[in-house]
Amino acid sequence: MRNLLFLGLLMFLFSCSKVGKTNQTDNLDEKTDVEIPAFSVDSAFAFIQKQVDFGPRVPNTKAHQDCANFLAEKLKSFQAEVIVQEADLRTFDGKTLKAKNIIGSYNLEAKTRILLFAHWDTRPWADHDSDPKNYDTHILGANDGASGVGVLLEVARQFNLQKPEVGVDIIFFDAEDYGAPDKFATEETTHSWCLGSQYWAQNKHKPGYRAKYGILLDMIGAGNAKFYREQVSDYYAKYVVDKVWNQAESLGFSAYFINQTGGAITDDHVYVNQIGGIPSINIIHQELNSETGFGHYWHTVNDTMENIDKNTLNAVGTTLLHVIYNEKP
């Protein structure tokens, strides 16, 4: 993913789209007596470690295939209905990626559905590394990729133990991080990112699939992470941002969920919103004063397990479980 320029954001926000602003105000602060399962940070951390242990999950590699099998089997073990959506996706540099979007669904009969998603692939280039010798090195993506997937696997484990009242679909999108490096970036490569979500948004796993809203987790594992209100999220799904940030505050996590405007990020939620027609938000760590807008290890060989903090995982996972289990059909 990458930051959008302000001018590009304005053009984007006022372009034609299948989704407009929403004014839903569905009792955001309504209190319920529902029992919320406890999020296990140790379990989430172990799921992140397992992905990293495969090595970089770059499409068309053995590590990528092995991790795909693991993710699908793990969701099945948590009693999800699993669909592996396979696609040949064309990259900006003319390659064909054998991509897999891995989808796990709960409460299939429920009409009210919530979409949770993260990307599971990793970047094939450490193009922001401080050492130019590492530019062509595949990255491990402990935070950028594995952290969001690890939290969602733990959430899936909880769904198996205690069924939520609404239907939930978890999607691990592929080929998110194959976007053109800065030295190759042109107007034509704008949509070279998020290839898996672009494909899914045009070819949903079930005809006519709809969800009330979607939540993307991306880079949610760093110590003292700051989750600002991402601009694309606020435009398409402000009420969802309000819902999540208010829930986080009520749980004592306002030091992580900052109720201030952050940057606009090219990420999977853009295409789920624009093409898929599902109002969706992005929970993503931003460092607004850094050169890239992200952590110093972003798209470098240093995106390793040392950057994963259990306190941050707990803040995100616990908030997410409270949001889902308080949702009514």
Image: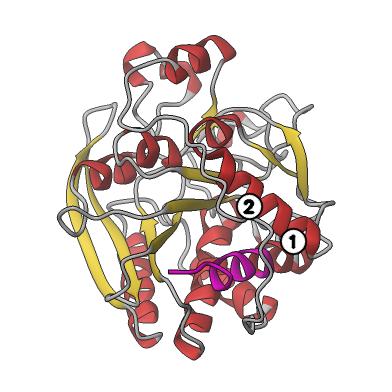
Residue 190 in percent (x, y) is at: 38, 21
Residue 26 is labelled as none
Q: Name the outermost residue toward the top.
A: 7
Nearer to us: label 1 or label 2: 2
Residue 278 in percent (x, y) is at: 37, 45
**Could you tell me which residue is drawn at 72 percent across and 69 percent down?**
314
Disc 2 marks a residue whose amino acid type is: Lys
| Residue 322 drawn in magenta | yes
Residue 29 in percent (x, y) is at: 69, 58
Nearer the observer, 42 or 209: 209
The answer to whether residue 60 is seen in the rendering is: yes
Disc 1 marks a residue whose amino acid type is: Thr
Residue behind mark 2 = 243
Residue behind mark 1 = 312
Please, what is the dominant secondary structure of the magenta stretch?
A: helix
Q: Which residues are magenta?
A: 318-329
